[in-house]
Image (cartoon, rainbow, N blue to C red):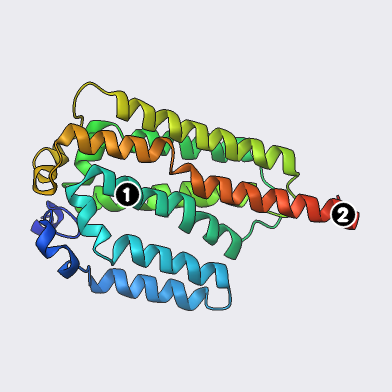
Amino acid sequence: MMPETWNTIYCGPAPVPAELWLRWNLDPVLLLALGALGFWLRRSRSGLLAVAALVLAFVSPLCALSAALFSARVVHHVLLIGVAAPLLARAWPAGVPRAGSVALLASTLILWAWHLPAAYDLALSWVPAYWAMQLSLLWAFTAFWRAVLPPGRPVGPALALIFVSWMQMALLGALLTLAPGPLYEAHALAPFEWDLTPLRDQQLGGLLMWIPAGIPFLAWAALIMRRGWRGLTEGTV
């Protein structure tokens, strides 16, 4: 028999504004896992920053807020795929440059699949599906960034991969922004507590995914260009 707590929203029910800052997630299994990851990556500044991003995503009140608002879930996912994943890739670099096209395709398919209404609503109502969503996104985008960020990767192909990944996410965001009605039953009621309708919340989330979510991708692209420029000036590229 499955534990009854599996058939619920991870981080608990959607909060109302007055209680948000009381809603820290102190799940002991999660804290143990994050502590173990931090210990493993303790010698890497990027690794520790990745753990900090995961703490913000899963321990802070953002976790509870993302149960209420789709727009908060978008911020949560951007933390995973645009901040934690590339930092993990820097802390755990690939030994040799890998084929980025496969990682790009896998990460794109996983991101889009979890935003299908049936899959998304399942993830917010069943804890195993929730963790399948989070871990598959983190794994797929860590693999993507491991293919993109190694110093041996030529600058041009690396930038092209980042651009395509950014564009596919922006396209998904545009579709969500322009959808004629709300798509996710998981956010059918809670947005009203935050002075939003479900459609407005979805439009805000889509808009965040469409434009601001590209900022981390631009930052990593700038880092690659800086590294390429340094290599040119030092005669190593």
Residue 156: x, y in percent?
73, 38
Can residue 92 be seen in the rendering of this structure?
A: no
Q: Is 189 situated left or right of 164 in this image?
A: left
Label disc, if present, on residue 233 of the rendered structure:
2
Relative image position of residue 209 (x, y in whole percent):
39, 39
Q: Is residue 24 above or below residue 72?
A: below
Residue at the extreme right? 235
Dot 2 amino acid type: Thr
In which quadrant is the N terminus drawn?
Answer: bottom left
Mark 1: which amino acid? Ala
Would residue 230 be seen by someone viewing this image from the given angle?
yes
> Which label's residue is closer to the chain start, 2 or 1?
1
**Label pair 2/1, CB-CB below 8 angstroms:** no
Q: Residues within 10 Å of mark 2 (few under 14, many from 20)?
A: few
Q: Is residue 33 above or below residue 127?
A: below
Q: Position of residue 119 (x, y in %)?
A: 26, 36
At numbered mark 1, what does the secondary structure look like: helix, strand or loop? helix
Point 67% across, 45% down: residue: 98
In terms of image quadrants, where is residue 33? bottom left
Q: Residue at x 46, y 51 (%)?
A: 139
Q: Real-space Cα distance between discs 2 and 1?
A: 45 Å
Residue 221 horizontal/vertical position (percent): 63, 46
Residue extending furthest top? Answer: 180
* Horizontal side, residue 227 vs residue 143: left or right: right
The residue furthest front is 195
Q: Which residue is mark 1?
A: 132
